[in-house]
């Protein structure tokens, strides 16, 4: 058998051995068997010394071609084997992705806090700051300085818890108005909201003896009723959605004049009328008005130069509307099955 | 609440718009219509019928058979169980196919073998409110006026063909607690004319002069007192039309005379009182304050102790009425009354309110006086009553009236600058419209060179200021015609204060650590202090007490937040949620000195029971002391608080004495944490241990505001070494850590306890603790030899101080 033939044979066998090699080890053996120092191809090349000088370059060329061919195939087979091994490993590592994820206990803010923050953020964006005041309050700040002298019939609107004849649990966040104006006067503007707990002697499905209000107050040189309407319309849209409409109804609060109650279009029925809005299409959300001149005067402002508006809303009411709650007591029961829904 | 009968209202004003629209217009003008009732709706085929004959039922003792005529058609035999009907009575008769209140349909039926072709009806079956019906008629068959024509639709006969508007009035609009008051608003809204009721009454017989005398001793509390005298009264029922109207207004008809006083009160808003003239001594009315210790028996039969700040109506023999609140029993109008002295007076609202409240007697009269009635209307109201008395033929009217009017009501004049209207409302209302609105509400307007001089009508006791007029203009102009604008002027920046941001941060951190926020009441039961195990001398037992709590359970202001959370845990546990973590931020109330407001301290409290959520691949961490400590550390770290330390706290009654700690920064105590004392767990019926903390927000706020500064990242690698030692169990880990830090040299950056091991080869009473120490320099790489040296120093220090042995 001539060398040329032998080389052909080696190539054929090497290729066959490589394709049947099932592991990297087998493949390495194949490599050593043919290309190693003692490998078959090396052996053939060693025998080239005996060839004539005409034959040698020709056979040398063939031998190189065979080596290249084997090496190329070796490379290809190697990556082929690696791929299939990786695939095997990956498939063996496959997990049940439908098992539940690791449980993290995440708590929740109380819905009243969530809603309070939303309201605060709207008014912070409008340039209001947040003021606070005591929950145990003097009769003076809760009533008298708000134009509600003792024996005023409007005191009936707010059944009061008393601590002493002169101190009480505030029935509204409005005393923060007075405290803020007293501190600020005669500087302008006053632009605050005042969220907080308030208390009234009332307890049923729609009343709680403790609840939350957010008060708003803006006092400056030229504040008008139209401004009040504008600010509250912005609030209504941000809080309840851009399509929300608001309407003002005349009402009465001793500390504002003119006074109004504000309704928003019912989000449930879009104003068509439904159970939630008692078929009126409107939902009452807050009371407001222009700060009564007497309140301005008592707090240190000259009511002929300065005007202002004030508003007050019940956080529970708005929370109940936002989440479609039907019983206020749920908000204070703190059942975790309830709290976890928000 | 004012119930307005539309039929009645039409006496004073033409109403040409549908009732729904009227209700809307009133609501949008400030008289909120809360409901519109049509009491007769659904009632059909019920007619007035006369009972011709009553015969016994052959098969039933309790039933009778009435032969009834409706005036035409054939007579009907109707079986009834009613006992109050007699032959000749005119009653409501429901015929076959009739519909009653509540949807009941009447069919021809047989009762004990006798055919019945309809039903005789009670007021209740016709939808009348039995609480405003004479008691004998409330449940028996309703007896109609015998002169009622037969065969009429019953709705017209008993006033069910009416519509009632329920007005929810604001306290300033006392003037609308009357039909005429509401009619005045309607007239102004619709541009109609208001017609007032007829008050002309022709007197007869002797003048009142000489028969009655009125002395007002305290004109501050009674500015006017009008008396009229009625003679030869025939007490009896008032006519059906008057009864229907009173019922519609929610008032029970009693007798013609009492009904007249109530009718006028509803019509004109002026409360009246009728005395039996012959029981008054000398016909002499004295309006004075009660004397100390004076008593009288009021109409309801109870004896009242009067005090000197109460106004009474007296005769020379003593008090005969609590002025404006309730009459006296002795001078009450009865069936035997022949002569009546009628009172129409104006009392001080504050005094009436105070008296009614301290006697616990609120009446239709007192609630009107409180809100301020028209002082000018006293005489008109008395005259109207006289007129009605004559119309009803219930008696004679003595000519004249005694009108004691020591404090004459002076009309108020308010200056209105039209510019001010725009200044306040932000919209220009034309001058002409301003004038016409005010005039439509009976204000008198005079133009005085640009300013308007506006005189307030006497029925508007709520109008004093220019702003009050502006409100009148705004509400009649229409609130919703005022545009939306945004305030002009200096811009302001809205931002939370650092303290407010801290609260936001604390809440967010707590929720991200798995805690649910709760909101509990600020008041609690006195027994809470015992359940929390507070010792008798605890300062937290000094609480604010409510004077008028709703219940004992809500009668003191809390001085601790945790008991509220324990209650919440208990409630959830009783609903089978036993793994949970809660927190609340809120105020506690610590009394200060006399006349001072209490100190209100913001507190963060957290409580956790059971364990953190677990899953198939992770066990739930128990909510024990260390869990809560970790939560607090995480919170403090998040707030950037450094240098806090824990000290054993064995004296806090809420906590287990061996599992509680106090957290301090320097001298300041941030709060306490621990596991709840087993006794307290038992007091709250908690099924398992609870860990908790209460943190003083004020201290937190004070300490956490410090700015954070950047520290350069290390440029050279650090070297970590582990150190395992065996120490006595009672040696606090904090002490060991401190010793390691002190002895570890300047390059020791971090000491971390990563394992604790008992048992095995560790001697009893000891434990093995494993620490990881990290050494690092800012300017070079440390060598092993250096670190070995420091480790040796540390081991020696530990051995010397705690007798700690190294474990290899």
Image (spheres, coloured by chain):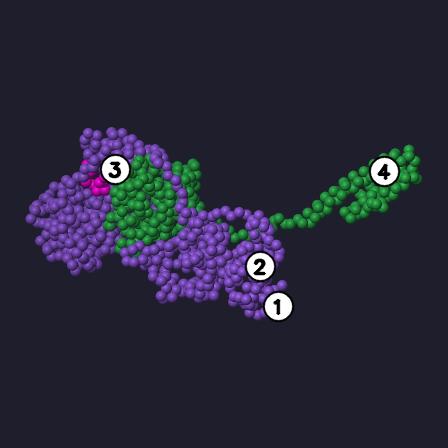
Chain colours: A green, B purple
Rendering quarter of residue A48: top right
Q: Residue shown at 90%/41% (left/top)?
A: A47
Q: Position of residue A107 (x, y in %)?
A: 49, 51
Q: Which residue is mark 4?
A: A63
Rendering quarter of residue A71: top right
In the rendered structure, which disc, 3 or 4, sits on the residue that comes first in sequence? 4
Local packing at callout 2 (Cα closer than 10 Å; few below 14, some 14-19, many 20+) is: some
Q: Position of residue A74 (x, y in %)?
A: 78, 42
Residue B457 counted in the magenta span: yes
Tell me the tag on residue B790: 2
Dot 2 and dot 3 residues touching (CB under 8 Å)? no
Q: Which residue is mark 1?
A: B761
Question: Separation of disc 2 and disc 4 at Cα?
Answer: 68 Å
Dot 2 and dot 1 residues touching (CB under 8 Å)? no
Local packing at callout 1 (Cα closer than 10 Å; few below 14, some 14-19, many 20+) is: few
What's drawn in magenta, residue-wise?
B455-470
Q: Main secondary structure of the magenta part?
A: loop
Local packing at callout 4 (Cα closer than 10 Å; few below 14, some 14-19, many 20+) is: many
Numbered disc in front, either 1 or 3: 1
* In the foreground, A230 or A244: A230
Tell me the tag on residue B344: none
């Amino acid at each position: 058998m001539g060398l040329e033939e032998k080389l052909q044979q080696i190539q054929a066998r090497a290729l066959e051995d490589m394709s049947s090699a099932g592991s990297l080890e087998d493949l390495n053996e194949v490599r050593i068997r043919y290309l190693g120092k003692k490998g078959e191809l090396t052996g053939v090349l060693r025998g080239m010394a005996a060839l004539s000088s005409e034959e040698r370059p020709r056979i040398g060329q063939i031998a190189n071609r065979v080596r290249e061919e084997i090496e190329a195939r070796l490379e290809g087979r190697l990556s082929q084997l690696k791929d299939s091994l990786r695939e095997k490993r990956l498939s063996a590592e496959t997990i049940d992705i439908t098992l539940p994820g690791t449980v993290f206990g995440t708590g929740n803010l109380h819905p009243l806090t969530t809603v309070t923050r939303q309201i605060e953020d709207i008014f912070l964006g409008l340039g209001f700051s947040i003021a606070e005041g005591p929950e145990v309050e003097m009769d003076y700040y809760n009533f008298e300085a708000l134009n509600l002298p003792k024996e005023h019939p409007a005191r009936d609107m707010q059944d009061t818890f008393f601590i002493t004849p002169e101190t009480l649990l505030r029935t509204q966040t409005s005393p923060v108005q007075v405290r803020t104006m007293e501190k600020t006067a005669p500087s302008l503007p006053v632009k605050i909201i005042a969220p907080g707990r308030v208390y009234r002697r009332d307890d049923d499905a729609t009343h709680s003896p403790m609840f939350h209000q957010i008060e708003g107050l803006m006092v400056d040189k030229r504040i008008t009723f139209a401004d009040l309407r504008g600010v509250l319309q912005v609030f209504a849209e941000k809080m309840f959605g851009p399509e929300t409409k608001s309407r003002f109804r005349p009402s009465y609060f001793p500390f504002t004049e003119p006074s109004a109650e504000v309704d928003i279009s019912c989000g449930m029925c879009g104003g068509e009328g439904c159970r939630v809005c008692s078929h009126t299409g409107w939902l009452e959300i807050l009371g407001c008005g222009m700060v009564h001149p007497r309140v301005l005067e008592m707090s240190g402002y000259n009511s002929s130069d300065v005007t202002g508006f004030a508003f007050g809303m019940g956080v529970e009411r708005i929370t109940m509307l936002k989440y479609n709650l039907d019983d206020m007591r749920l908000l204070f029961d703190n059942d975790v099955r309830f709290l976890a829904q928000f | 609440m004012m119930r307005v009968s539309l039929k009645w209202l039409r006496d004073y004003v033409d109403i040409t718009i549908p009732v729904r629209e009227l209700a809307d217009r009133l609501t949008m003008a400030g008289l909120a219509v809360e409901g519109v009732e049509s009491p007769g709706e659904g009632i059909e085929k019920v007619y007035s019928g006369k009972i011709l004959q009553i015969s016994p039922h052959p098969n039933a003792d309790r039933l009778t058979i009435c032969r009834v005529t409706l005036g035409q058609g054939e007579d009907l035999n109707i079986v009834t169980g009613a006992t109050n009907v007699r032959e000749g009575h005119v009653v409501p008769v429901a015929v076959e196919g009739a519909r009653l209140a509540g949807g009941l349909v009447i069919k021809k039926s047989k009762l004990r073998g006798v055919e019945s072709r309809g039903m005789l009806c009670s007021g209740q079956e016709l939808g009348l409110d039995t609480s405003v019906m004479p008691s004998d008629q409330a449940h028996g068959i309703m007896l109609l006026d015998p002169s009622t024509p037969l065969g009429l639709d019953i709705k017209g006969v008993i006033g069910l063909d009416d519509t009632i508007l329920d007005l929810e009035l604001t306290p300033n609009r006392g003037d609308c607690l009357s039909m005429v008051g509401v009619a005045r608003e309607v007239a102004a809204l619709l541009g109609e004319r208001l017609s007032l009721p007829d008050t002309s009454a022709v007197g007869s017989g002797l003048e009142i002069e000489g028969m009655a005398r009125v002395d007002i001793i305290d004109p501050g509390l009674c500015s006017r007192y009008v008396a009229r005298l009625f003679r030869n009264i025939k007490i009896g029922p008032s006519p059906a039309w008057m009864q229907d109207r009173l019922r519609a207004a929610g008032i029970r008809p009693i007798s013609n005379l009492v009904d007249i006083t109530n009718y006028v009160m509803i019509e004109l808003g002026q409360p009246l009182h009728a005395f039996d003239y012959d029981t008054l001594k000398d016909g002499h009315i004295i309006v004075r304050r009660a004397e100390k210790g004076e008593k009288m028996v009021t109409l309801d039969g109870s004896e009242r102790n009067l005090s000197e700040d109460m106004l009474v109506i007296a005769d020379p023999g003593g008090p005969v009425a609590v002025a404006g609140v309730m009459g006296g029993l002795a001078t009450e109008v009865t069936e035997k009354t022949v002569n009546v002295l009628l009172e129409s007076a104006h009392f001080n609202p504050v005094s009436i309110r105070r008296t009614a409240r301290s006697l616990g007697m609120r009446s239709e009269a007192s609630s009107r006086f409180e809100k301020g009635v028209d002082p000018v209307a006293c005489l008109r109201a008395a005259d109207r009553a006289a007129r009605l008395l004559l119309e009803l033929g219930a008696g004679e009217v003595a000519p004249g009236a005694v009108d004691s009017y020591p404090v004459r009501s002076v009309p108020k004049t308010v200056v209105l600058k039209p510019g001010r209207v725009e200044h306040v409302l932000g919209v220009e209302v034309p001058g002409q419209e301003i004038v016409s609105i005010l005039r439509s509400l009976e204000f008198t307007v005079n133009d005085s060179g640009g300013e308007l001089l506006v005189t307030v009508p006497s029925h508007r006791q709520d109008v004093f200021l220019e702003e009050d007029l502006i409100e009148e203009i705004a509400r009649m102009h229409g609130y919703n015609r005022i545009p939306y604008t945004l305030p002009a002027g200096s811009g302001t920046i809205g931002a939370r204060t650092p303290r407010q941001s801290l609260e936001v941060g604390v809440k967010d951190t707590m929720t991200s650590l798995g805690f649910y926020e709760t909101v509990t009441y600020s008041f609690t039961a006195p027994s809470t202090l015992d359940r929390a195990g507070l010792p008798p001398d605890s300062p937290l037992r000094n609480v604010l007490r409510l004077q008028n709590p709703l219940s004992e359970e809500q009668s003191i202001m809390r001085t601790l937040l945790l008991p509220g959370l324990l209650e919440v845990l208990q409630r959830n546990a009783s609903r089978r949620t036993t793994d949970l973590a809660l927190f609340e931020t809120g105020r506690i109330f610590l009394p200060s000195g006399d006349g001072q407001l209490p100190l209100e301290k913001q507190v963060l409290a957290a409580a956790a029971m059971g364990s953190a959520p677990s899953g198939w691949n992770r066990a739930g961490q128990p909510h024990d002391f260390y869990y809560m400590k970790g939560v607090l550390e995480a919170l403090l770290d998040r707030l950037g608080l450094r240098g806090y330390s824990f000290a054993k706290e064995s004296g806090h009654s809420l906590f287990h004495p061996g599992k509680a700690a106090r957290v301090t920064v320097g001298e300041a105590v941030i709060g306490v944490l621990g596991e709840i004392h087993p006794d307290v767990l038992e007091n709250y019926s908690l099924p398992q241990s609870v860990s908790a903390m209460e943190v003083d927000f004020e201290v937190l706020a004070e300490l956490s505001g410090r700015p954070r500064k950047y520290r350069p990242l290390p440029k050279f690698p650090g070297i970590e070494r582990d150190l395992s030692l065996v120490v006595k169990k009672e040696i606090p880990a904090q002490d060991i850590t401190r010793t390691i830090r002190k002895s570890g040299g300047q390059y020791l950056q971090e000491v971390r306890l990563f394992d604790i091991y008992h048992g095995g080869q560790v001697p009893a009473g000891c434990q093995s603790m494993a620490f990881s120490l990290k050494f690092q320099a800012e300017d070079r790489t440390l060598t092993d030899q250096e670190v070995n040296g420091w480790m040796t120093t540390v081991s020696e220090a530990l051995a010397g101080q705690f007798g700690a042995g190294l474990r290899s």
